[in-house]
Amino acid sequence: MFTRTRVAAASGTHATFETHVLGSDGQPVGEPERSTSTWIELMEHATFPVDRTTIEDISLRTPAGTFDAWLYTVEGPKPGIVTRFYFAKEHPGAPVQYEQIVDRKVVFKVVMISAS
């Protein structure tokens, strides 16, 4: 299954997101879901426990381009679970890719396909 999320509106304090489920043809199915978060709430999403997190400088290729990035690898919260967040140095905000690995298998992955 694929979803497309975009920033529908933003202010100095909030951002509103619109998420569409996409069919196998890449076209939206049904109506989009909208959600609003404060910038503080969004910032808290990128707060990781220091004792379980490593940070590396990497280069990452995605459909949206190639980025110099920071890779945050977070171990846990349970044994066998690893989550990786790839933050582009030149594009502040959400990671350009993130994935969760359980017992060495990727079980969830999000990749930015466009930066527009």
Image (tube, rainbow, N blue to C red):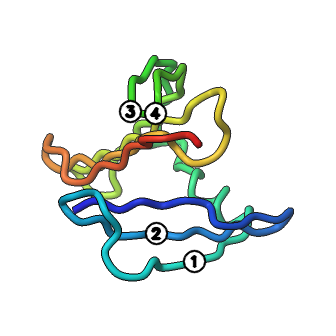
Calculate the distance from the C-alpha at mark 1 to the C-alpha at mark 3: 25 Å
Q: Quadrant of the N terminus?
A: bottom left
What amino acid type is highlighted by mark number 1?
Answer: Ser
Residue, disc 4: 64
Label 2 crowd bin: few (<14), some (14–19), many (20+), radius 10 Å: some
* Residue ID at (54%, 19%): 68
Query: Outermost residue toward the right?
Result: 12
- Secondary structure type for disc 2: strand
What amino acid type is highlighted by mark number 2?
Answer: Thr
Query: Closer to the N terminus: mark 2 or mark 4?
Result: 2
Residue, disc 3: 63
Residue, disc 2: 19
- Secondary structure type for disc 1: strand
* Residue ID at (14%, 40%): 104
* Marks 3,2: beta carbons within 8 A: no
Query: Closer to the N terminus: mark 1 or mark 3?
Result: 1
* Marks 1,2: beta carbons within 8 A: yes
Residue, disc 1: 35
Calculate the distance from the C-alpha at mark 3 to the C-alpha at mark 2: 19 Å
* Residue 116 in which image quadrant: top right
- Secondary structure type for disc 3: loop
Image coordinates for residue 44, horizontal then vertical, percent: 63, 59
* Residue 92 in which image quadrant: top right
* Residue ID at (41%, 37%): 73
Query: Closer to the N terminus: mark 1 or mark 4?
Result: 1
Query: Closer to the N terminus: mark 1 or mark 2?
Result: 2
Calculate the distance from the C-alpha at mark 2 to the C-alpha at mark 4: 18 Å
What amino acid type is highlighted by mark number 4?
Answer: Ala
Q: Is residue 108 above or below residue 19?
A: above
Which of discs 1 and 4 lies nearer the camera? The answer is 4
